[in-house]
Structures are given as structure tokens and as C-alpha cells.
Amino acid sequence: MNNTPYVYAYARVSTEMQAESLEGQIDEMIAGAEDIAENIEGDFIRCRADSLSAVEVPYSERQEFKKLLIELREGDHLVVRQLDRIDRDPRRILEAIHFFHKRGVVLHSLSKGTEPFDVEADEQDYDRMMLEAWFSRKQIAYIRERTRPAMAAHKANGLPVSTYRYGWKRKSLPRGPKQRRNTIWVPCERERQQIRRIVARHDAGESMVQIAQEFDERRLLTAEHRPWGKKRPCNGRLNVNRFYRVYQVYKQHGENWDAY
């Protein structure tokens, strides 16, 4: 009988349109799971991922998560970025946590480091997590209610839905006293060159993590003077979601910057 603990990871985004975000999340999960496997002298097996809304589809009905429930055995470890990746409903999160606890599966949330999540020992963290899950669910409903009319109006007028345009930068227009700030989008050749470099290097076989590390070392900034990849406070790793996002947009639109 093999007594070596196995380490699994799970990633989730809400829609298929977030594919680039999912890839970045999977990279983060694999790196975190491998660190945990090394610390416990176990073996990292795989990272499973779903592209389904946790509000609409509970964890027990997601295809990849159901496979995890079958694979996990007593003494194994499961790694997620945050507990809301399992589910958004606080009651279902509680149900999942107790299910894993009863089966003997050790749960890790990278939002609090690589230490295992213990329901009994971390009562304060558990209460805070439940409140965050409840507020997160309410916030999603509120954001959807407020943004749907604006998104529909933008689509009807042929305007980009996103509040940020890659390859462009905002320029403030002159304004008089007591007037609201008004801006327009103007081309940013510096950021466009950076995007072309990201695409070319990734197509040549480099991982987004390698590209992000090089951008971070050189302190390259976007047109909005922000870092391309911020380091996550939970583990110090770079967030590569922006790199995947611009890669996907460039592959879709190419040099047609007006479509960005």
C-alpha cells in the first residue's frame, strides 16, 4: 500500500471567456501544490479546473470537481487559491469543508499561505471566510445589476465593453472650474511594442511566468504606469493574468488596435 500523500489542486473561473485568467490560475495552483508536496514529502498529481459559475452550478455538479471527489483519499491534500473557488454559497462551502474533514482530506487555501486549513483551530479565520463569502455573493449580484445596462449600451454603440484598452492610454482634456474630469483614449506605442514582445516570446515557447519575471526585473510598466504583473501577497508569486489576457486579445484582433 502506498502511504505517500498525494497533492491535488483545483482552479475555477465563472465563464469560458475567462480562459486566459484560468491558465494563470492553473499555473499558480501548480506552483503552490508543488511547494506543498515538497514540504510534506508527497507527490503532486494534477490540477483540475472548471469554467462554470459557482452561483449557478454547485461544486457537486461540476464535472472536474466531481472527478476530484472520486480521486481524493484519506491523507491527501487539496489546494485552492481561495475557498470561494470551491463555491460562492457559504452553506455549500461549509458543507464541502466538513466533507473533506470527515474523509481525512487536508485543505489548503493559498490566500493564507501554504498552511492547511483547520476548521477547529482556525475558528476566527473560518468566521471571517464565511462573512467574505456572503459579502462576495451579494457584491456579484450588485455588480451585475449595475453593469448590465452600461455593457448593453456599449455593445449597441459598437464600443469596447472593457474599462481598459490595451495599446492605448488615457489623456485628460482641459476642463474649467467645477467641471468633471474628461479623458480620451490615445495610442500608446510603448505598450503596443510590449504586447508584441509578449506574443512573440510566448509563441516561441516561453511560459508566461518567465516573461512576467523578466518584465518585473526590468520594471516595465503599462500605459497606465502599473506593473504588468503584481506579486500576490499570499505567496509572493507574480500574477500573470494580464499577460494571458493581452495574448488572447492580440491573437483575436492582431494589429487592429481600434478593436481593443
Image (cartoon, rainbow, N blue to C red):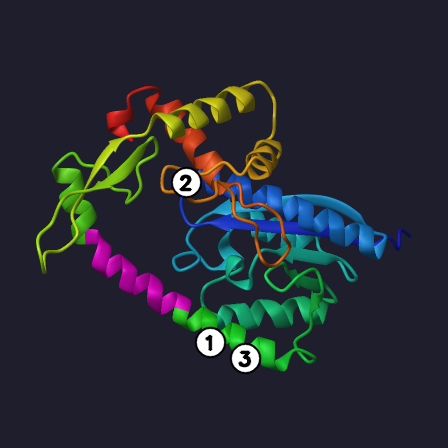
Say which residue label 1 marks: 131
Q: Is residue 141 magenta?
A: yes
**Left or right, residue 20 beside residue 39:** left
> Which dot marks residue 210?
none
Above or below: residue 16 compared with residue 206: below
**Left or right, residue 131 beside residue 148:** right
Give the quarter of the image for residue 126.
bottom right
- Identify which amino acid the numbered label 1 is placed on: Leu
Say which residue label 3 marks: 127
Q: Which residues are magenta?
A: 136-148
Say which residue label 2 marks: 16
Cβ–Cβ below 8 Å for labels 1 and 3? yes
- Circle 2 sits in a helix, a strand or a loop, which is it? helix
Above or below: residue 259 compared with residue 141: above
Query: Which one is earlier in the sequence, the residue at label 2 or at label 3?
Result: 2
Circle 1 packing at 10 Å, graded few (<14), some (14-19), many (20+), is few
**Predominant secondary structure, magenta span:** helix
Q: Position of residue 61 (x, y in %)?
A: 50, 55
Residue drawn at point x = 70 percent, y = 50 percent: 33
Foreground residue among 136 and 178 = 178
- Circle 3 sits in a helix, a strand or a loop, which is it? helix
- Identify which amino acid the numbered label 3 is placed on: Asp
